[in-house]
């Protein structure tokens, strides 16, 4: 999403020599020189041409797919978001689960028990419904409550839209979860 303040939601997963980029777009922070894949949540997104160009410079193309490398699984799952297929990803290794689901209308049940979830935050206190009733964006308050019910341990809002930006400007904070920050590194380690 083209935000007036933030770069489009994106993630670089670094694990055991692998580099996988998720979404992103204009103003994406520095990318690795080599990547294994560029995964997207929406192959019809408004930034698809930008992503294609950026991915081509790194010798790949953006796509919605599942991947597996040694003990790392990146599993594509559908999300209810719009009239065409859209996805999120459940990333699993050594018993740790990270979920990348920056856009959805309904909280994805497959995100349950995630150690870390990057989630929808386009709207602050009420959902945004798309014209024609074909989906939309869940609100931060609804996402936080659903994440708590589904056992998500750490919730980071990654797709911060205008209503949420206005809430930030008023000094409001989510009751559950935290705002994502561009360039921040999130590290998970097995507890064995």
Image (tube, rainbow, N blue to C red):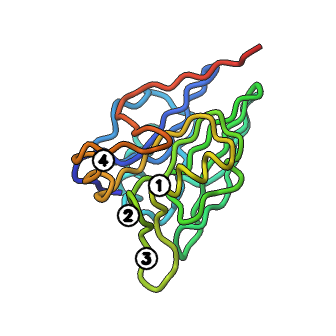
Which residue occupies 36% across, 34% down? 181
Give the foreground label among 3 and 2: 3
Q: Are marks 1 and 3 in contact (CB under 8 Å)?
A: no
Q: Earlier in the sequence, mark 1 or mark 3?
A: 3
Answer left or right for 37 relative to 175. Answer: right
Q: Are marks 3 and 4 in contact (CB under 8 Å)?
A: no
Report the residue marked by disc 2. Answer: 46
Which residue occupies 41% across, 82% down? 131
* Label 2 element class: loop
Give the foreground label among 1 and 3: 1
Question: Compared to 127, does 117 lie above or below?
Answer: above
Give the foreground label among 3 and 4: 3
Q: Residues within 10 Å of mark 2 (few under 14, many from 20)?
A: few
Query: Residue 70, position in %: x, y?
Result: 76, 27
Q: Earlier in the sequence, mark 3 or mark 2?
A: 2
Report the residue marked by disc 4. Answer: 26
Tell me the quarter of the image containing the N terminus: bottom left
Tell me the CA gap for discs 1 and 4: 28 Å
Q: Between residue 129 and residue 34, name the one nearer to us.
A: 129
Q: Earlier in the sequence, mark 1 or mark 2?
A: 2
Tell me the CA gap for discs 4 and 2: 11 Å
Quadrant of the rendered image containing residue 125: bottom left
Q: Between residue 111 and residue 169, name the one nearer to us.
A: 169
Q: Do we see residue 17 in this rendering?
A: yes
Q: Which mark is residue 130?
A: 3
Which residue occupies 60% across, 20% down? 17
Tell me the CA gap for discs 3 and 4: 24 Å
* Label 1 element class: helix
Q: Earlier in the sequence, mark 3 or mark 4?
A: 4
Q: Do we see residue 70 in this rendering?
A: no
* Label 3 element class: loop
Q: Earlier in the sequence, mark 1 or mark 4?
A: 4
């Amino acid at each position: 999403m083209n935000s007036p303040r933030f770069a489009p939601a994106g993630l670089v997963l670094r694990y055991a020599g692998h580099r996988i980029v998720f979404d992103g777009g204009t103003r994406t922070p520095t990318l690795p020189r080599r990547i294994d894949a560029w995964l997207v949540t929406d192959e019809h997104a408004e930034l698809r041409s930008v992503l294609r160009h950026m991915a081509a410079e790194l010798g790949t193309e953006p796509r919605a797919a599942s991947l597996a490398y040694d003990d790392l699984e990146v599993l594509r799952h559908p999300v209810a978001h719009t009239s065409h297929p859209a996805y999120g990803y459940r990333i699993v290794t050594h018993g740790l689960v990270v979920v990348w689901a920056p856009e959805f209308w309904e909280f994805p049940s497959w995100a349950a028990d995630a150690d870390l979830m990057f989630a929808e935050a386009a709207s602050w206190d009420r959902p945004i419904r798309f014209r024609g009733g074909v989906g939309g964006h869940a609100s931060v308050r609804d996402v936080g409550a659903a994440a708590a019910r589904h056992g998500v341990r750490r919730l980071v809002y990654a797709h911060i839209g205008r209503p949420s930006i206005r809430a930030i400007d008023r000094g409001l904070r989510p009751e559950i979860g935290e705002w994502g920050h561009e360039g921040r590194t999130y590290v998970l380690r097995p507890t064995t």
